Amino acid sequence: MGKIISLLNHKGGVGKTTSTINIGAGMVELGKKVLLVDLDPQANLTLSLGIPRQPITIYEAIRGEAELDPYTVKPGLDVVISTLDLSSAEMELINEAGREYILREIFDPFREDYDFILIDCPPSLGLLTLNALTTSDFVLIPLQTEFLALQGLAKIKQVIQKVRLRLNKGLDIGGVIATMYDARKVLNRDVVETIKKYFGPLVFETYIRDNVALAEAPAQRKDIFAYNRNSPGAKDYLSLAQEIISRSNKAAER
Ligand SMILES: Nc1ncnc2c1ncn2[C@@H]1O[C@H](COP(=O)(O)OP(=O)(O)OP(=O)(O)O)[C@@H](O)[C@H]1O
Ligand SMILES: [Mg+2]
């Protein structure tokens, strides 16, 4: 049975989408079958992989109008695309019974077809994000190793706690990812130390370095392995994907 993992941080621009794409592509390098889900109305993940407009997006599935038919980017890597229309979903669903469980209903059947399903959350803690957490086995929190990285984290922890209590007992924090790390910058090193004090062993050993190839790849509509597999970005995301798979295996043994 495949695991469902959400990438969450309501702070914008911390590396959620970059991490979703490249952890997924890293898992594919390691022989896994992966489904990426773009849950952000900005559709950055969809655009970054250059996926042509499809008749069915996550929005139609959430509205119950159509069944999802994921788009295959390359062998082992499928994507459920998003669209700007998704921005109205939160309002439309507000009076729906069981509104926090819509994504779970949609994605549970897909667990049979994939090893990992990765959900790229929007930078908010609204109903779409709640749905992602209700559906997930793990949540991963990307943190940019900059000033204010930890600001707002108490809120994330609180939301995760509430979801565990009321909606999804099985939800765990799978780990914290340090992103855009530059070892030459004292500030970055200091922030990582602070993150480690706060989260302890939850912080992955792999830090994602600040690497221009990771910013260039989306302009070429490619994941980092298709764009430049010798880049530091490719090395980091492969190592991180390996760590996530190991943690997931260990959790399954418990
Ligand atoms: N390790 C990195 N090195 C260099 N640039 C990076 C790295 N990670 C992400 N970026 C760039 O930083 C910007 C923000 O990254 P990304 O879009 O992944 O963040 P996000 O958290 O998904 O943002 P949003 O909250 O808007 O959805 C992008 O332009 C991306 O290409
Ligand atoms: Mg994003």
Image (cartoon, grey):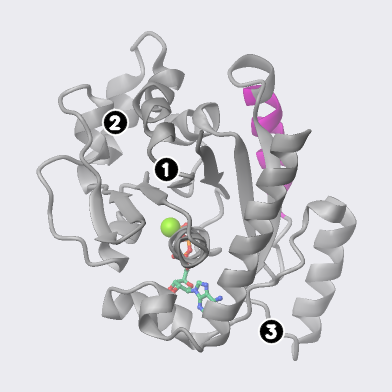
> Could you give the CA–CA distance between mark 3 and mark 2, rounded to whole angstroms?
38 Å
Q: Label 2's element?
A: helix
Q: Main secondary structure of the magenta part?
A: helix
Classed neighbour count for the residue bearing mark 3: other residues with Cα under 10 Å, few (<14), some (14–19), many (≥20)? some
> Label 2, on which residue?
89
> What numbered label is drawn on residue 182?
3
Side (left or right) of 179 relative to 183: left
Asked if disc 1 is less than 8 Å from ligand 2, the answer is: no
> Could you give the CA–CA distance between mark 3 and mark 1, rounded to whole angstroms?
34 Å
> Label 1, on which residue?
114
Classed neighbour count for the residue bearing mark 1: other residues with Cα under 10 Å, few (<14), some (14–19), many (≥20)? some
Q: Nearer the viewer, residue 244 or 18?
A: 244
Rendered view: 39 above or below 101 = below
Q: Position of residue 99 (x, y in %)?
A: 40, 17
Visible in this render: residue 29?
yes
- Residue at 68% x, 60% y: name it: 243
Q: Residue furthest left?
A: 55
Indicate the amino acid at tag 1. Answer: Tyr
Side (left or right) of 166 relative to 32: right
Q: Position of residue 143 (x, y in %)?
A: 65, 61
Indicate the amino acid at tag 2. Answer: Ala
Q: Which residues are magenta?
A: 151-163
- Residue at 71% x, 70% y: name it: 206
Rendered view: 96 above or below 19 = above
